[in-house]
Image (cartoon, grey):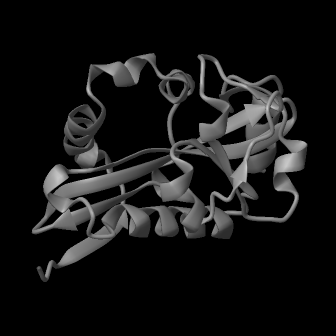
Amino acid sequence: MSLDVAYAQELAAHDTEIEDINAEAFGPGRFARAAYKIREGGPHRRDLSFVALVEGQVVASVRMTPIAAGKGRALLLGPLAVRPAYKNLGIGKKLVAIALEAARKDGWTLVILVGDAPYYAPLGFSKVVPAGQLTMPRPVDPRRLLAAELEAGALDGFAGAVEHAGLAAGAAEDLRAAAE
């Protein structure tokens, strides 16, 4: 099947379609997950989040949310969701590659996610976070807590309780410094 897929930065106009895709992919159980709890803490980075479009309709999306653990900062990738009719066409993998490249260009050194290693390891999430290094706000299978180091050794400095970066101690100072 030859498919014309366009990839674009996420816009507010995509929100309803993205919510529909996430509901379809993850169901109501998504609200109980650790990553969702973190994302409830504040906004994702729309400039680092992307959609796949077919004939102007969103068929897949990936989001990036700034997170903190202790003094460390990283991005949380997810949710990554693809409409069933468009699965197994490489669209999700392409979205992850685009998001990681955007994060790298924006100066981020680490991206974390909760997912399946067989899918994500070839996409750069080759490190399983060592047991006990991070504490998630809800239970997570430690084998599914994966990291993509955009800079060698970035995972070493990321330890502690994971929360949205906007909730982290010192976040106001970090935001002020970034604005200057």
Marks counted in the figure total 0
Residue 145, x across and y down, in percent: 64, 39
Q: Residue at x 79, y 32 (%)?
A: 131
Q: In front: 54, or 14?
A: 54
Whole-percent x, y for residue 14 in the image: 25, 48
Q: Residue at x 50, y 68 (%)?
A: 97
Looking at the image, residue 70 sits to the left or right of residue 36; the answer is right
**Image quarter hosting the N terminus:** bottom left
Which of 17 and 13 lies nearest the eye of the viewer?
17
* 135 vs 173: above or below: above
- Which picture quadrant has residue 126? bottom right
- In this view, the residue in front, 127 or 157, is 127
Left or right of residue 122: residue 160: right
**Residue 23 placement (x, y as % from top left):** 24, 32
Q: Position of residue 55 (x, y in %)?
A: 10, 69
Residue 39 drawn above or below residue 9: above
Q: Is residue 54 left or right of residue 148?
A: left
- Residue sitting at 60 percent across and 18 percent down? 139
Q: Is 51 rendered above or below residue 27?
A: below
Quick check: 133 above or below 9?
Answer: above
Instruction: Name the quadrant containing residue 167.
Output: top right
- Kindly identify the residue that appears in the image at 82 percent across and 49 percent down: 155
Horizontal side of 174 relative to 36 (left or right) equals: right
Q: Residue furthest bottom?
A: 2
